[in-house]
Amino acid sequence: MSDLTHLTIAGALKGLENKDFTAKELTQAHITASEAAKDLNCYVTETYDLALAQAANSDERRAAGNAGALDGIPLAIKDLFCTKGVQTTACSHILEGFVPQYESTVTANLFADGVVMLGKANLDEFAMGSSNTTSYFGNCINPWKTSDGADRTPGGSSGGSASAVAARIAMGATGTDTGGSIRQPASFCGISGIKPTYGRCSRWGTVAFASSLDQAGCFARTVEDNALILRSMAGHDPKDSTSADRPVPDFLSALSGDVKGLKIGIPKEYRVDGMPKDIEALWEQGIEWLKDGGAEIVDVSLPHTKYALPTYYIIAPAEASSNLARYDGVRYGLRAAEHENLNEMYKKTRGEGFGDEIKRRIMIGTYVLSAGYYDAYYIKAQKVRRLISDDFTKAYEQCDVLLAPTAPSSAFVIGENEDDPVKMYLNDVFTVPASMAGLPAMSVPGGLDSQGLPLGLQIIGRAWDEETVFKVARSIERAANFTALPQTLIKKAA
Amino acid sequence: MSIDKETVVKVARLACLDMSEDELARVGPQINGILKWMEQLNEVDTEGVEPLANVVNIDLKLRADEVTDGDCSKAVLANAPEETQGFFVVPKVVEQEG
């Protein structure tokens, strides 16, 4: 039975269709595996009963010949997506106990295609973090370890999603990516993850962090499985005016093509000082793989790359400070017990309900939006954002996609980089620029570093061109043939 | 630019955050560090550059001005910390003159 948890989604769909096993058996296998991997703290809310009921319905649909595109596939859902009748917290104390009365468009789309939900996955509080250490419900642990045995971060903010997929307790997962929150955890956990073009998936019903950057995406262990999940998630939604009214391409058909003749841009500004040798070597290896596949390598320049991080850390907190103004103890979530009057209730509720990183970002956001500083910080950042976006437009005159590392390190030990917020922010150095420009970007595992930890390669595409991103990612996946398993899984099997 | 303690207190008030003296003392230098790091943007010449707010150039759509929702006050109130007779309850706002 445990073999079922090692299947790909595409493989499981075939097995279900062939009646090799039922959706109920597939779901039960993942629940059993989840129970055995509780120490990873991937799920903040387990929905096993719901999952088994959904699986039973799925089996009935399949028997009746009405199976959807992902019917019976058990996924983890990041606890940032509102799920009707199931607690949704954004991993914040301030939303503890919040039970949405509506379904987010992304999860509604997935359920319409037959997806089974195993649980709500851990994340950094309000998706603000790069290590899943700001969650009110405790750290999530990466199943990958080195010989020191220390607990490592799965990355963030979608740490629970990535860890669950890597640990084979979910076949795939939803995530959201504001500055790298899908790609960096995918890299740290040795799986694939894609952030599509801004506007590809509806943001309706997803707890907001920074609205001009937030974009839903997914994780899976193969590129093909990502294409399957994304196809179900994506699409226009009248309830989100920034969701794109354009047809969702058949991402799967892009996977069969080769990269012959494609122009792969290598941005020279991503060769940062102090980049670990293993990451530099993997990048070179990725270039060689694509060359061998018949692609042409082009050196390109994105001159404003070094300004992307400080720009992001003005714009994202500014939008967050505005979005998080809604948490006031009146309509949902926490209300502070002791207060003398309305204003004090607001202040105490927010003071008690938000964690340190959230308060820090709300303060930064409030400051850069306040009278006298709005032009100097916020407008200035929006102008630099245009220059960053223009850099990509110019680069795509010379190439079809960009290839770069996903993150500047492999998974670090939990507790590292906590002493200085800026140090933690530097984790996003390679992922933030594409976010600033709203571009689709995917991380695929390329290999292991000298410590035996996975490293990802990042493919950044033109807006609305996820197909080329998938095609190049599939090509790298084929060449890399990444079959390594997390040490915690190997130990269990032994 | 470095912000002083007074400004940190003011920002916390604007953001409606109740923070202890300890918290303010800790967060002040962190915010200063972050703002200092952001100052590198001053190196960038942005003369004549239009600020970018909407990254994918989608024109915001308008829909017909019709009622599409409603009659769901129970659902709206379902998560309220305190509610009564179809209303959210908050601490008294207007004091009665004595």
Image (cartoon, coloured by chain):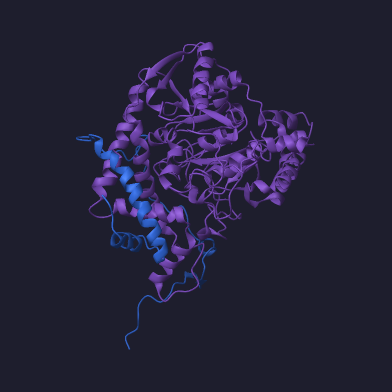
Chain colours: A purple, B blue
Image point 59% across, 36% down: which residue? A189
Return the residue nearer the eye: B14 or A396: B14
Quarter of the figure that contains the N terminus of chain A: top right
Q: Quadrant of the C terminus of chain A?
A: top right
| Residue A51 appears left or right of A225 | right
- Figure label count: 0
Spot occupied by residue B83 in the image (x, y as percentages of width and height): 51, 71
Q: Is residue A64 visible?
A: no
* A43 on left or right of A205: right
- Across and down, in percent, residue A205 comes to 50, 49
> Measured along the vertical axis of the image, is residue A272 above or below residue A423?
above
Furthest-left residue in this view: B47
The answer to whether residue A388 is left or right of residue A11 is: left
Q: Nearer the viewer, residue A157 or A59?
A: A157
Residue A203 visible in the displayed image = yes
Indicate whether A244 appears above or below B71. Answer: above
Residue extending furthest toward the front? A148
Is A297 located above or below residue A56 in the figure? above
- Residue A341 figure quarter: bottom left
Q: Nearer the viewer, residue A437 or B75?
A: A437
Name the residue rendered at 59%, 31% in the picture.
A454
**Residue at the farthest bottom position:** B98
Q: Nearer the viewer, residue A90 or A448?
A: A448
Residue A344 x/y as whole percent: 40, 71
Quadrant assignment, res A136:
bottom right
Residue A74 location (% of width, % of height):
67, 40
